[in-house]
Image: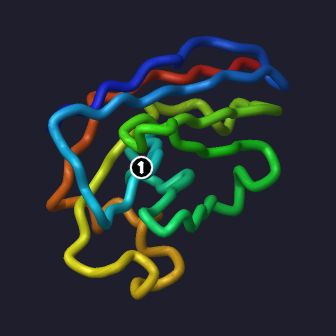
Amino acid sequence: VRLVESGGGSVRSGGSLRLSCVGSGYTYSSYCMGWFRQVPGKEREGVASIDSDGRIRYTDSVKGRFTVSQGNAKNTLYLQMNSLTPDDTAMYYCAAVPLGVASATLSDLYCLRAANYDEGDWGKGTLVTVSS
């Protein structure tokens, strides 16, 4: 399985970026897919996720500003980021993990937790820098 992110860059505070993640080599019937971010010295943080039942979750700090979506083929994940602030500066990663159960049976924030992707796959990341 291979995940490749793109779309990162440098923007001013208040600007927008759209991240893309294209996956290849897998077809999961039950899965989580998500966007995560990490800054040096801090743990990887779940930003937005979607599961095979279509449940979408966001971390509180991005609600109302970020929108996660999938392409029709379900192997592409997007993250539209609006009203960016310097606090959004981070390396952004895409991840996917197959599930052994229906995603709807899992806890509400299961797909937003990075630790739950240990048996899955991660992209190499794309850097987002927001200046004030």
Q: How is the image coloured?
A: rainbow
Residue 98 position within the rendered picture, expressed as x and y whole percent measured from the top left: 23, 62
Kind of residue indicated by mark 1: Lys
**Residue situated furthest front in the rendering:** 72
Circle count: 1
Image-quadrant location for residue 22: top left
Q: Is residue 93 visible?
A: no
Residue 124 position within the rendered picture, expressed as x and y whole percent measured from the top left: 27, 28
Q: Is residue 68 above or below residue 57?
A: above
* Quadrant in which the N terminus is drawn: top left
* Quadrant in which the C terminus is drawn: top right
Q: Image point 50% across, 58% down: which residue?
A: 50
Determine whether the residue tagged by mark 1 lies in a helix, strand or loop: loop
Q: Is residue 81 visible?
A: yes
Q: Is residue 109 above or below residue 41?
A: below
Q: Is residue 104 above or below residue 27?
A: below
Horizontal relation, residue 30 to residue 62: left or right: left
Q: Image point 28% across, 62% down: which residue?
A: 29
Q: Image point 45% across, 81% down: which residue?
A: 104
Q: Image point 69% across, 33% down: which residue?
A: 81
Horizontal relation, residue 5 to residue 118: left or right: right
Residue that mark 1 sits on: 42
Give the class, few, some or many, for how many residues have Cα within 10 Å of label 1's Cα (few <14, many ≥20).
few
Viewer-side residue, 86 vs 28: 28
Image-quadrant location for residue 17: top right
Viewer-side residue, 79 vs 10: 79
Residue 6 position within the rendered picture, expressed as x and y whole percent measured from the top left: 44, 19
Horizontal relation, residue 17 to residue 95: left or right: right
